Image (cartoon, rainbow, N blue to C red):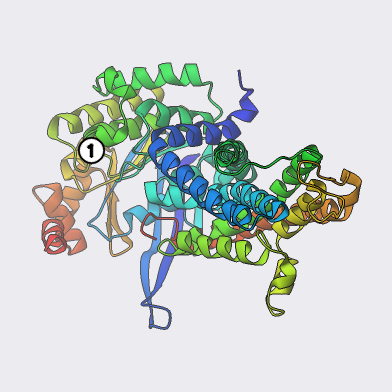
Amino acid sequence: MIPAFMRPLWAFVFRDWHLTRRYFSWVLVFTFYSLVNAATIALIGVAAHDYQLTLTLVLGVLLWSFLSAMFQEISNSISYERWEGTLEYTFMAPVHRLTHLLGVSLFAVVYSVVRTVVIMVGLLLFVHVSFAGANLLGVLVVLLVASVAFMGLGLVAAILPVLSPENGAQATNIVQGLLLLVSGIYYPVAVLPAWVRPLSALSPATYALAAARKLMGLDNPASRPGALAGAPLGAVTHELLVLALMGLLLVPLGLWVFGLVEHWAKRTGKLKRTG
Amino acid sequence: MYAIEVSNLQKTFSTRQGWFGPQKTERALDGVSFHVDEGETYALLGPNGSGKSTLIRILATLLLPDAGSVRVLGNPLPGGEAELRRRIGRVSVDAAFYKKLSARENLLYAAQLYRLEPRRAERTALAILERLGLDQRRFYDPLEEMSRGMQQKIAITRALLHDPPLLLLDEPTTGLDPASKRQVQLFLEELRAERGTTIFLTTHDMAEAERLAERIGFLARGRLVAEGSAAELRKRAAAPDLEEAFIRLTGEDFKKNEKEEAL
């Protein structure tokens, strides 16, 4: 039994679960594509006979799969509503925007975890890697802390479909693409052109990956195939603090910006289905 | 206290063609003033583009007025949205739903937004749908498999789940077959008689306005041109029926406008 005050939050989880169920064939297709994409990337490391490269790519693929799925679910939640024409009904319900976006985020986190686990299991059919010696629990902590920052980014990106009914959803893909480019998912950010590098400092994924690589022992010369020298959680305190700070800033910033755009949409009449 | 009190309401929209095109402004509401008593049914009649939907969106907290004062169930707008939203239900001309979800899933989602207990909400929903004449077996069907009439009945059910004292109905029977239209109208009459629900509706349908509403407002080009009971409006315009009264008092021909828009 859900307590009354939690019901609005649960309503979004309920809705998104049933939508996922009804669009299951789409979920299957996208997950299959992501798995194939992940395998092709990870196999580059296998072809190079470099276990460190393979692990770096596998870690990048899984971490990006999780963070991007979560970002996409949150940032696209408004586009889905535009598409279905239900945005006005959600906005006139007696639900605080924080509850609305937390409900969407809660489902997004669970969905992204399940999807990433499926991709991870699928990857094992293509790539044989051992995580022995890696601090996997530490990686999980990093992922959880990074999730909050990514929720904030998702909230900021969710304003785009409110701003532009026609192009907003596509614009969120540009934001996602930029994050992929600057965060060094498959390569160290040091290889980025000098003019792009400063942007990597603004992406939570940069810190999440840097921390996860240390915890996996990927940059540690003491690591050997099948015996990684993963760092303890204390070694990534700096990254965790930056990620926590980003989360603390981005979530309220996302809500504030969303509030401003909602006010603008109500002034200009942009909440309507066709805008 | 009035359920709705609107004074000198103004709303203008600006549109721009492309990024650098000239800006066009359109006055949707121009100094509209009226009130609706508690428990009253008030119908707003006007052709497409007259400002009906803009007005109902402002009352539903979905649009901000540019100027004038709006008070709904004692709550000023803007400002009193949080309190007001618990106490209004709205049905729009397009039954907006998650089309892949069943009626049950759509209604339970809406019920939980209003903090309703799902099992109780399900019983309420089934009771309302039965009165609206919807076969209960359709409750579990996706909305995309339902006719417009069925979807509109689900929309009315959604608006009533939390038992709001004020219903805002934007052309609730447009596109319905005559039998469905009669069922909805009868239900609205019963609702008002049983619960004293205040109903504010916009419509194109003169007969519907005359049947349901105690008072009718004529809205044309964003201005409330005349209001009163159907009999008062006919008398004032010395017209044989409400349609003729509308033409004489507003200078606009409903049917002609609709034909022009269809072309």
Direction from residue A130 to residue B50 in the image, left or right = left
Q: Which amino acid does label 1 sit on?
A: Arg
Q: Which of A115 and A146 is in front in this view?
A: A115
Direction from residue A126 to residue A30 in the image, left or right = left
Q: Which of A35 and B151 is in front in this view?
A: A35
Direction from residue A21 to residue B94 in the image, left or right = left
Residue B55 placement (x, y as % from top left): 39, 54
User: Relative to A156, is A111 above or below?
Assistant: above
Res A228 visible: yes
Residue B179 placement (x, y as % from top left): 14, 29
Q: Which residue is drawn at 72% across and 45% down?
A: A143
Q: Name the residue under label 1.
A: B148
The 10 Å Cα crowd at callout 1, few under 14, some 14 to 19, many 20 or more, is: some
Residue B72 placement (x, y as % from top left): 49, 44
Q: As drawn, which residue projects farthest toward the right?
A: A234
Res A259 visible: no
Residue B126 placement (x, y as % from top left): 36, 19
Disc 1 secondary structure class:
helix
User: Relative to A161, is B158 above or below?
Assistant: above
Q: Residue at x 69, y 50 (%)?
A: A55
Query: Split into 4 quadrants, where in the image is the N terminus of chain A?
Result: top right
Q: As drawn, which residue projects farthest toward the front?
A: A49
Q: Which of B257 and B212 is in front in this view?
A: B257
Q: Residue at x 13, y 60 (%)?
A: B262
Query: Split into 4 quadrants, where in the image is the C terminus of chain A?
Result: bottom left
